[in-house]
Amino acid sequence: MTPDYFNDQLEDNATILQPNEGETFSMNGLSLTFKVTSELSNDELGVYKIKLAPMAIGAKLHYHRFMDETFIVDKGTLTIQVADKEYTAKAGTIAYVPRFTPHGFKNDTNEEVELTLLFNPSQKREGFFRGLHETLGEVPINPEKYLKLYNKYDSFPVDTSNMIPVRT
């Protein structure tokens, strides 16, 4: 068959995920649901729904070398740290954090926060979240194992002496 260089070949490859669909697990005051995975998007995009319990920390100050991260606050008020500034992000706020930008996020309120987190490209982020679930479930949390996981999945803490997402 001769290739057609002039017409697009259309495909039906969409995936529709309903609100309660996707793999979900909880850890350390955070509930996470995989929506668009690295496998589904050919590693181009990762979309995850997160629920942060009151006073929970999502991540301490860190950066990525090869991916950008976007936060969309769906419910509640999220505190987003970017470099040495903190921002109060209410429902409807979108925060785009390009690579090499130090950032962290937490819930400083007494209400649950819901957000959508996007990574592009996704860098197989599901492996990071599964490893995080395992690491944060250990008592005590092993900082060396935590750092190894972080670095494997393109996450670099700004301060390795203050990288574990727990309030002290």
Image (cartoon, rainbow, N blue to C red):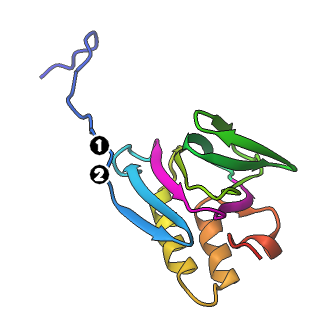
Residue under numbered circle 2: 21
The segment highlighted magenta reads 44-63
Residue at image x 52%, y 53%?
Answer: 123
Residue 66 lies, in percent from the top left, at 63, 48
Whole-percent x, y for residue 52 in the image:
56, 59
Is the C terminus in the top left, top right, bottom left or bottom right quadrant?
bottom right
Please, what secondary structure does the residue beneath circle 2 have? loop
Under mark 2, the amino acid is Glu
Local secondary structure at mark 1? loop
Number of dots carrying numbers: 2
Q: Is residue 28 left or right of residue 151?
A: left
Tell me if residue 49 is in the magenta stretch: yes
Residue at the farthest left position? 1
Whether residues under marks 1 and 2 lie with C-beta atoms below 8 angstroms apart, the answer is: yes
Judge whether residue 61 can be spotted in this image.
yes
Q: Residue furthest front?
A: 110
| Residue at the image point whose x is 46% and y is 69% from the top | 26
- Mark 1 Cα-neighbour bin, 10 Å: few <14, some 14–19, many ≥20: few
Mark 2 Cα shell of 10 Å, populated few (<14), some (14-19), many (≥20): few
Residue where numbered disc 1 is placed: 17
Query: Residue 127 or 2: which is nearer the viewer?
Result: 127
Which three-letter amino acid code belongs to the residue tagged 1? Leu
Residue 99 quadrant: top right
